Structures are given as C-alpha cells and as structure tokens.
Amino acid sequence: MIKPDAVKAGNIGNILQMINAAGFRIVAMKYTHLTMDTAGKFYEVHKERPFYGELCEFMSSGPIVAAILEKENAVADFRTLIGATNPANAEEGTIRKKYATSIGENAVHGSDSDENAIIEGNFFFNGLERF
Ligand code: ATP
Ligand code: MG
C-alpha cells in the first residue's frame, strides 16, 4: 500500500517508479479510501498495540493505493526496498528514507510473510482484478 501521507504529498508516481525499477511486476492495483472499520480489519493483528487507534485514524485519513506485486523473493525484497518502520532508521535509498515522515506516517506498507501477502491481496482484490 501507498499510505495516505505519501498520496497527499504527491508521491504516488515517485514510489511506483522505485517499485518498477526494483523489478516488481504489478499484478493488481487500486486507488481507494479505507474507513476506520476497514483499516481496523486490515491491521487487526495490531489490535492490542497502543498505536492501533492512531494507526486506523491515519490509514483512513485519505485515499491509498493498494497493489499486489510479484517478484522472486518478493516479501523480503520489498521490505528491503521500503526500509525500516521508523524512517529515522531506514537505509539511504529506501522508500521510507525518502518519503516517510515518522514511525506512524511512513509512506508505504509491505506484507511481512507470503502467508500474509495472500491474505492482504485477497482483502483488496478479487480474481477479475489480477493480471
Ligand atoms: P507495515 O505493516 O505498515 O508495512 P511495518 O511492518 O514496518 O509496517 P508494523 O510493526 O507492522 O511495521 O506496524 C504497522 C504500522 O503501524 C507501521 O507501519 C506504522 O504505520 C504503525 N506503527 C508501528 N509502530 C508504531 C509506533 N510505535 N507508533 C505509531 N505508529 C506505529
Ligand atoms: Mg507490518
């Protein structure tokens, strides 16, 4: 996902360019706006965390871009491309180093396992929306 902060800042194009340059293929893509309820479901694993409310508020604060990306070793390579959760700790040249502003407003989301990538892809896309 490209998160609301990066969409608002006009960075959709820049981020997609970095994703393409890193060799990911776009299987599905959607411009949409999460509600408190749908953001809450997406991030349900974090329900008990102190930042859950803040995270759901932020993720529903504006439109997002959701995508399914394909590549060998996609989960690990995408996490390398996006950088650390907190942009202060993100490597130079990563998406979060360039475009994130804080640990909460950190420009992009990446799945953390193949299993969750399938669940998260199914959250946004049906079979007719994948190519
Ligand atoms: P994401 O799942 O969005 O790719 P991540 O896997 O790097 O991020 P997680 O630990 O899964 O990090 O946290 C999910 C999201 O919750 C973070 O991307 C960030 O937006 C928010 N978050 C995490 N930790 C904090 C925190 N300490 N304070 C505020 N928000 C946080
Ligand atoms: Mg995560």
Image (cartoon, rainbow, N blue to C red):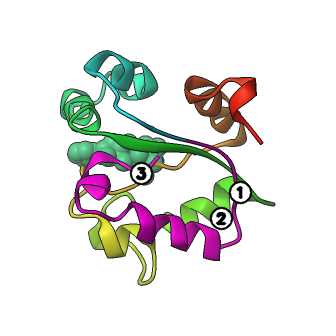
Q: Is residue 28 magenta?
A: yes
Q: Nearer the viewer, mark 3 or mark 2?
A: 3
Which residue: 31% across, 61% down? 86
The earlier-in-sequence mark between 1 and 3 is: 3
Q: Which residue is mark 2?
A: 77
Q: Nearer the viewer, residue 92 or 62?
A: 62
* Helix, strand or loop for disc 3: loop
41 over 3 or under it: above or below: above
Q: Is residue 2 left or right of residue 49?
A: right
Q: Which residue is mark 3?
A: 2
Q: Is residue 118 magenta?
A: no
Rendered image: mark on residue 14: none
Identify which amino acid the numbered label 2 is placed on: Asp
Among the 4 quarters of the image, the one containing residue 93: bottom left
Magenta residues (range) = 1-29
Q: Is residue 69 left or right of residue 33?
A: right
The earlier-in-sequence mark between 3 and 2 is: 3
Q: Which residue is mark 1?
A: 74
Identify which amino acid the numbered label 1 is placed on: Ala
Identify which amino acid the numbered label 3 is placed on: Ile
Q: Position of residue 49 (x, y in %)?
A: 29, 30
Mark 1, Cα crowd under 10 Å, few <14 / some 14-19 / many 20+, is some
